Amino acid sequence: MTLCLAACDKTPSSAATITTDTAIPKSWIDPDTGHKVVRLSEEPGSRSLYFHQNSYAASGDKMVISVDNPKGVAVVDLVSQQVTRLYEDPNIGILFMGPVSRDVYLTYIPPIDGEVVHPQNELQTPTKVLAVNIDSGAVRDVATVARGKIHSINNDETLLIGAFAEAAHNLETGPRDSRFEARYEAKDADGNPLSFADAKEVRMDERLEKRIPMQMFTVNIQSGEQKTIMKSTDWLNHIQFSPHDPELVMYSHEGPWHKVDRIWVTDIHGKTPEKIHSRMMNMEIAGHEFWSFDGSTIYYDLQTPRGQDFWLASYNLETGERVWRHMERDEWSVHFNISRDGKLFAGDGGDNEMVAKAKDGKWIYLFDSVPVKDVAGISARNAKDLVKPAVLKATKLVNMQNHDYRLEPNITFTPDGKWLVFRSNMHGPVHVYAVEIAKH
């Protein structure tokens, strides 16, 4: 699969009319990096998926994005760059592409008293899960969940997994701006407004301390049977099936990262949960965890301590090997990701209000991981049992100086590894973009 450039011929879609945003360039060469950037979306308000949710068809030829006005899902042909509206309904939200099928999974949340229900972290309303074929548009009902949020699908598309809380708690403090993803507001002890990032911490801590009873559950896609696999008063979130083992689950204890032990794995049969990272110092944080594509390794943002020293860490479930990859403050990113062959990493940067408080961090980055070798080939006697150090070597791909990071870019590699896809409000309205990794 190769993304076409601006000269590609585009045949008008017969499925739906797309309103092109002509005020925003379709493609350009970033003057600061020399890399080509293309706008994949045609409509303002378009968004790519969250960084660990699969948006790509298994064959790598198409991806799904959300669109607004009217709300729905669209399909981007990664060869022709043609964008086609697939499904429209004000009450739906995109979950993910099926890992083996050509279906995109959606949630449908019925309106209450005629009002659209905004999907929060802990839904207390019935949710219907739909699957829509991205080629034919055929729609099928998958399941109806009495309450709770669906997080992930396993690699053979037999199970969904999600969680619900016994009581709702809204983290946000008011209606969202259409250019951003959330609204968090709080004040310090002197009554001064906190930054976006710090206000989010306050709101998350309030939720954590409520100790709301929760359940993690699976849904059988064939039968619709719902089964509880875990009960907890910890805040269960960020649930991800392994891309290799259809019964293995990674999840987080959500909350302020310096307060919780965040990253865990279990299975659908009640296996004793395994903690993936143990804190060694006060204010150490680990989070925004994600799988390698072969399912062998868990990667995560590690800071020792928070906001001071920055690593992209990993733990291999099969061998127990740990690698910590060091980066500079300005290279820290809200989210990291990995190419399918495991050779390259990417980051979406951050502004000076984020945890790293970067002075020059508003970039889309590509990273090579370079191991720190033993001096003169002399190893510690227990070297195989120690963390392996490495350094991330950064290449800047896109200047994001005009991007407001209250919208997270959520970078992903295209399946062929040649482009990075991200969302941005750099031109005002939110659009989906891709930057070519190769430099011409």
Image: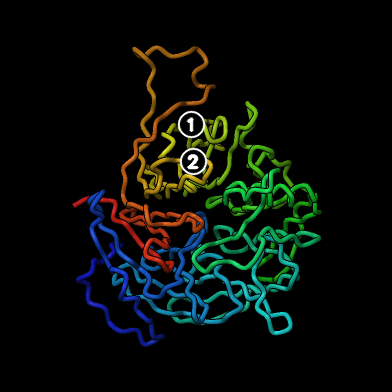
Residue type at tag 1: Trp
In the picture, measured across the screen, residue 65 lies left or right of residue 367, that is right
In this view, the residue in front, 199 or 392, is 199
- Residue extending furthest bottom? 14
> Depth-wise, is mark 1 or mark 2 nearer the camera?
2
In this view, the residue in front, 355 or 319, is 355
Q: Position of residue 402 (x, y in %)?
A: 38, 56
In the picture, measured across the screen, residue 349 lies left or right of residue 149, that is left
Q: Quadrant of the N terminus?
A: bottom left
Q: Is residue 248 visible?
A: no
> Dot 2 lies on which element?
loop
Q: Colour scheme in the image?
A: rainbow
Residue type at tag 2: Lys
- The CA span between labels 1 and 2 is 21 Å
- State which quadrant residue 317 falls in: top right
- State which quadrant residue 22 falls in: bottom left
> Dot 1 lies on which element?
strand
Q: Is residue 224 visible?
A: yes
In this view, the residue in front, 134 or 402, is 402
Q: Position of residue 275 (x, y in %)?
A: 66, 37
* Identity of the residue drawn at 57% across and 49% down: 195
Q: Position of residue 345 (x, y in %)?
A: 40, 44
Q: Which mark is residue 220?
A: none
Image position of 117 with respect to 271: above or below: below
Q: Which residue is mark 2?
A: 357
Q: Position of residue 68 (x, y in %)?
A: 49, 76
Q: Residues within 10 Å of mark 1 (few under 14, many from 20)?
A: many
Q: Which residue is mark 1?
A: 324
